[in-house]
Amino acid sequence: GENVEQHPSTLSVQEGDSAVIKCTYSDSASNYFPWYKQELGKRPQLIIDIRSNVGEKKDQRIAVTLNKTAKHFSLHITETQPEDSAVYFCAPGYGSNYQLIWGAGTKLIIKP
Amino acid sequence: DTAVSQTPKYLVTQMGNDKSIKCEQNLGHDTMYWYKQDSKKFLKIMFSYNNKELIINETVPNRFSPKSPDKAHLNLHINSLELGDSAVYFCASSQDGGAGDTEAFFGQGTRLTVV
């Protein structure tokens, strides 16, 4: 079955610095690679996604890069701000047998 | 104009009771899900329905029974509640057929506390 690993589990960065979170998956059938942000006490919300025919996608300060050969994709946040503090989840989709496995989450802490 | 709404937001109940959580989406999506988020923040899918048909039924106790009267509603009924059922339960919907290859929209969550 699908195995999804997310690293690191906790990431603490200085405000203004960059943050990178990596997600590794096992099912080569996966073709959708989203990142969700969950603020404390709130629901998860999609912040950026990419499909397997694209290698990189940017939206202002956030970007996602995909390496399908190595089966991993990463979330990049530049010029981090206090409101970026949250838990981030990856959730590769369209694996075989309709498995929906989410990464364990990365707690991002932005230090002032 | 809430997209995915679930009720109640908080639920405190005693062990052994039976409770239900309701979920409705007005996005016109064909697929709805129930997720459980434990105290360590792990998000685990429990069930998914596509057009009222069950397509994912993960290994959860059979005390949990989903019901989908129509494709806009997916309710979760839990029998004989146990302490370990305490968690936040999220309902979600998406436009895809259940493979998780489109954005999932989540409800606000129901924090269930079993005492």
Image (cartoon, coloured by chain):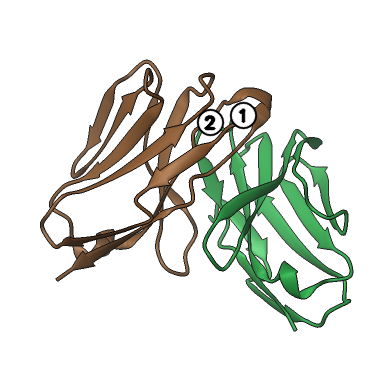
Of the pair B113 and A107, the residue shown nearer to us: A107
Identity, as a three-letter code, of the amino acid under mark 2: Gly
Answer whether residue B98 is visible to the viewer in this image.
no
Mark 1, Cα crowd under 10 Å, few <14 / some 14-19 / many 20+, is many
Residue at numbered disc 1: B99
Question: Considering the numbered disc 2 on the image, is that residue within a helix, a strand or a loop?
Answer: loop
Residue A93: give its label.
Answer: 2
Q: Chain A is drawn in which colour?
A: brown
The answer to whether the residues at label 1 and label 2 have Cβ atoms under 8 Å apart is yes
Of the pair B15 and A3, the residue shown nearer to us: A3
> x, y percentage for residue A33?
43, 31
Mark 2, Cα crowd under 10 Å, few <14 / some 14-19 / many 20+, is many
Q: Which residue is drawn at 68% across and 53% down?
A: B24
> x, y percentage for residue B76?
78, 57
Protein chain holding label 2: A
Q: Residue at x 48, y 22 (%)?
A: A31
Question: Considering the numbered disc 1 on the image, is that residue within a helix, a strand or a loop?
Answer: loop
| Quadrant in the picture for residue A3 | top right
Q: Which residue is drawn at 63% across and 38% down?
A: B28
Identity, as a three-letter code, of the amino acid under mark 1: Ala
Q: Colour of chain B?
A: green
In the displayed structure, A97 sits above or below A11; it is above
